[in-house]
Amino acid sequence: MVEPVGVYISVPFCKAKCTFCNFASGVFGAERMQQYVERLGGEIRRAHVAAETIGAALPKAVDTIYFGGGTPSLLSAQQFRLIFQELRGEFDLAADAEITLECAPGQLADETLDELLHQGMNRISFGVQSFIDQEAAAVGRLHTREQCEAEIARVRSAGVREINVDLIAGLPHQTEHSWRYSVEQAIASGVSHISVYLLEVDEDSRLGRELLEQGSRYGAAAVPDEDCVAEWYQQACDLLGEAGVQQYEISNFARPGHLSRHNLKYWRRQPYVGFGLDAHSMLLADEGAVRFANTSDLDRYLGQESLPNPLRVLEFERDATDGEVDIVGRSEAFEESLLLGLRLNEGVDLSVLRGQFGESLLQDAMPALVEVRDAGLLELSTERIRLTPKGRLVSNEVFSRLLIPSAA
Ligand code: SF4
């Protein structure tokens, strides 16, 4: 049976730009948003033709959809209606598909919520970041703690059972005490899923530039020390675990039975297709798998509507870096399976890895795995490998030590 595909839809619009963020997102007017939705519709409509042109298998069956951004909740009811119309025209949506909307608290109109519920949306992810108003405001978030709580209650009473709250450790002005408060508030809200990220400041964001130049406008001087933030992350893991919100991935925690089905596809290396600005895809192909990405330049993305030839569309659309579609070779696929799987607490089942790739690639990786195990960062048994709590804290270091030179 062909495995259903996950669909990611990028909506790169925000009401205000957060100080630490340099994603391909921005503040745009209504006209641009409408243009974008129409362009998105065209891209979805051509999805199977484009996939066929590059020899990628794009299943018709879809069992997860994720609207990410940006702030997708800013789109209107009518715009969502159009997107779903295109999706249903091109794909077969499973009756129990997980459909997630990323949302900034206070930025989801009643009419849009009603339309999304009608379309089957059943999961909302709120970008709360902090339940302390000063901390949220310092990075440019427009909501208060009260608003976040009211929003969670509102969507819950509208029938949304799967709710995620994003938190960020390491925000300007954050302290051990205030961080603990945010984690406790997230737990007390009763949401089914909580994501905990460590602040990553893009060098080209306003806060990033200020950190480099040691300025003071965006709170660079009030960014907590990295070692403290690492401790706070561990503290969050403990608090969430005690509350029954179990960690299942480096940054993700869920009550039993409420894991994000869409995001699990990324870590389990299952196929997904992305539409919209800077959206990435990974699909199976004869050679194994192909990866491709859309441009991150909005003007360029919007301008592609006028290119009628599928090959030209492919050339421009499926090309974030002026390169080609990336064919994932066997050793690269092995490395991806290993590193993505290690992000999960369940780790990697070695018999599955052997079944997919044979013994030799695993044996090649063994010296590095043993070295990382000896450093206390990895548990390695005959059946399974998984990161230790210490390994999860320094996962990027672990992954770079496990990189296979021939696959890099
Ligand atoms: S962090 Fe999210 S909400 Fe803030 S500017 Fe970036 S994409 Fe928009």
Image (spheres, rainbow, N blue to C red):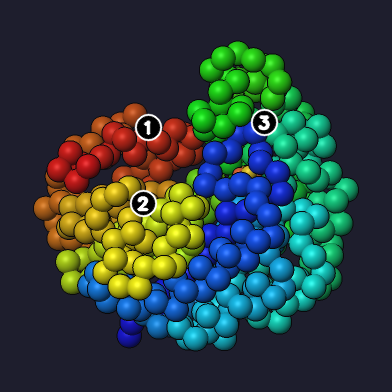
Q: In this view, does 12 lie to the left or right of 351?
A: right
The image position of residue 90, as x and y in percent, is 45, 83
Is residue 360 something one can see in this rendering? yes
Q: Quadrant of residue 126?
A: bottom right
Is residue 69 something one can see in this rendering? no
Mark nearer the N terminus (1 vs 2): 2
Pick the front one: 75 or 308: 308
Pick the front one: 185 or 282: 282
Mark 2 and mark 3 in contact? Answer it, CB < 8 Å. no
Circle 2 — which element?
A: loop
Mark nearer the N terminus (1 vs 3): 3
Residue type of the residue flagged with mark 3: Leu
Pick the front one: 58 or 249: 58
**Residue at x 40%, y 83% (from the top left corner):** 60
Mark nearer the N terminus (2 vs 3): 3
Residue 286 drawn above or below residue 302 = below
Circle 1 — which element?
A: helix
Residue type of the residue flagged with mark 2: Ala
The image position of residue 295, as x and y in percent, is 41, 53
Residue 171 numbered mark, or none: 3
Residue type of the residue flagged with mark 1: Glu
Q: Is residue 317 left or right of residue 247?
A: left
Q: Is the CB–ligand 1 distance for label 3 below 8 Å?
A: no
Residue 320 numbered mark, or none: 2
Mark 1 and mark 3 in contact? Answer it, CB < 8 Å. no
Residue corresponding to mark 1: 397
Q: Nearer the viewer, mark 2 or mark 3?
A: 2
Q: Quadrant of residue 121?
A: bottom right
Circle 3 — which element?
A: loop
> How many C-alpha atoms fall within 10 Å of the one at disc 3: few (<14), some, or many (≥20)?
many
